[in-house]
Amino acid sequence: MTDILLAAAAGPGDLRAALRAGRRGGTGPCRVAVLDPTPQRIEQALALIDRGEPWQGGNDLWFAPRPAPPGGTVFLFPGLDARTGPPPDDVLRWLGRPAGPASGSTGLAERTRATLRLNRVLHAALLRAGIVPDAMAGHSAGEWSALFAAGLFAEPAFEDFARTMGAAPVPDVVFAAVGLPAEAAARLARDEPGVVLSHDNAPDQSVLCGDEDAVGRCLARIADPEVPRRVLPFRSGFHSPMLAPYLPGFSAVFDRVPLARPSVPVWSATTVAPYPDDETELRALLNRHLVEPVRFRAVIERLYRGGARVFVQVGCGSLTRFVAATLAGRPHRTVSAGSATRPQLDQLRWAAAALWAEGHAPDLPALGLTTPAAAPPPSSGPAPGIGPALSTGPAPSTHPVAGAYEAAVAAVSASVETVYRTWRERT
């Protein structure tokens, strides 16, 4: 496993001295986490400490001069993504479970199974590491992962669901991600009856769905060559009216799944509200979810308004970037428990280290991480606003100076991360 350095102190000066002396652990609200602490990375961490501003993950460094603002934690489950990560066999071994089945196909059914299984394994691993949510939400097929994780879908039904969901016939239409807000993306398709907006992901990304030639004409209408655009490597018609004639095949799978009361609320990206308790309404929503747009940006806004401040991606995808773009300028934290590039257990350990740096208290020894002495309890607790009775009022108040400072820092961090990820996606 990759080494991760964790160090804490009362303030930046003491923390800098501890790093210079090679000391790990410690106590205090000023914290740093360094993945693979080479001399070069240690020097970079020292430079961040000297600046005294939060740093959230860039170059595998995490620095928090003070605990994160209090608020609830939300688990976000990704759906199918253009990038797929390594299998979670290392996490399964850590959990004491057998390795999962080999993935030998890039077809829709196999990609769906692989996504649901990765999300499921990482959810179990987060719970074992002492990282628990106050609410859950998903993106596209990731919403099914959230339903299983919360217990609303009965666990024994998972294997049948994962094996059969995605195997039903689907329309031969394409998805195209564009670097535009939903309103602007929809205007591109105004004269194309065979193209619809299927996803409102963030202020800087939307997805169009439809006939391949018609979608190509929509992309050609983007005058600015700097606006990202990309046809995605899977076809399904999910979240569009084009799927409606194929819905019975999916409804049959839903009807076989027993329902139970969830352990935490699961938020729907169709209604931008928790899933209903009434079984008839809930099963109807499962079908609506497949033929109506994904309103992921609106879900994040509503959760934030209700008190959510920490968003943990339980899988491999782009949800942390969507959250950062949506909440730019407002204090929040995003971490991902899954990775498209590094071993999944290393990424899980890094996510726990990042949350520890922000004042949380994951089970570090369980992950083979050095335990800081007398670690304080987590700074964030359950936020009542993201539970069943969502608060629709303003976020909890803070001192205006502290609030302005946190907002400025969050804006800079989000901007840096967005620029970097956009560059990575284009190269």
Image (spheres, rainbow, N blue to C red):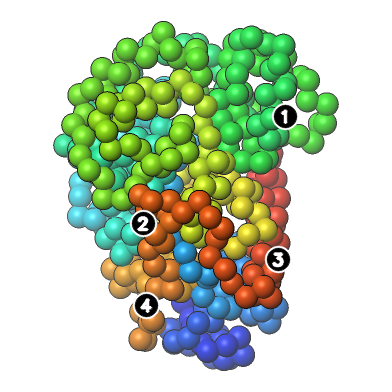
> Which of 310/338 is in front?
310
- Give the Cα distance between marks 3 and 1: 27 Å
> Which of 330/411 is in front?
330
Q: Which residue lies at the image location 20% right of the left edge and 24% below the top edge?
A: 256
Which comes before the other along the chain, label 1 or label 2? 2
Side of 249 relative to 205 (left or right): left
Q: Which residue lies at the image location 27% right of the left edge and 33% below the top edge?
A: 278
Quarter of image, res 30: bottom right
Work out whether residue 138 can be spotted: no
Residue where numbered disc 1 is placed: 184
Side of 382 relative to 298 (left or right): left
Amino acid type, residue under disc 1 in the picture: Ala
Quadrant, the C terminus: top right
For mark 1, give the secondary structure.
Answer: helix
Mark 3–mark 4 CB contact (< 8 Å):
no
Q: Residue 133 carries which label?
A: 2
- Give the Cα distance between marks 1 and 2: 34 Å
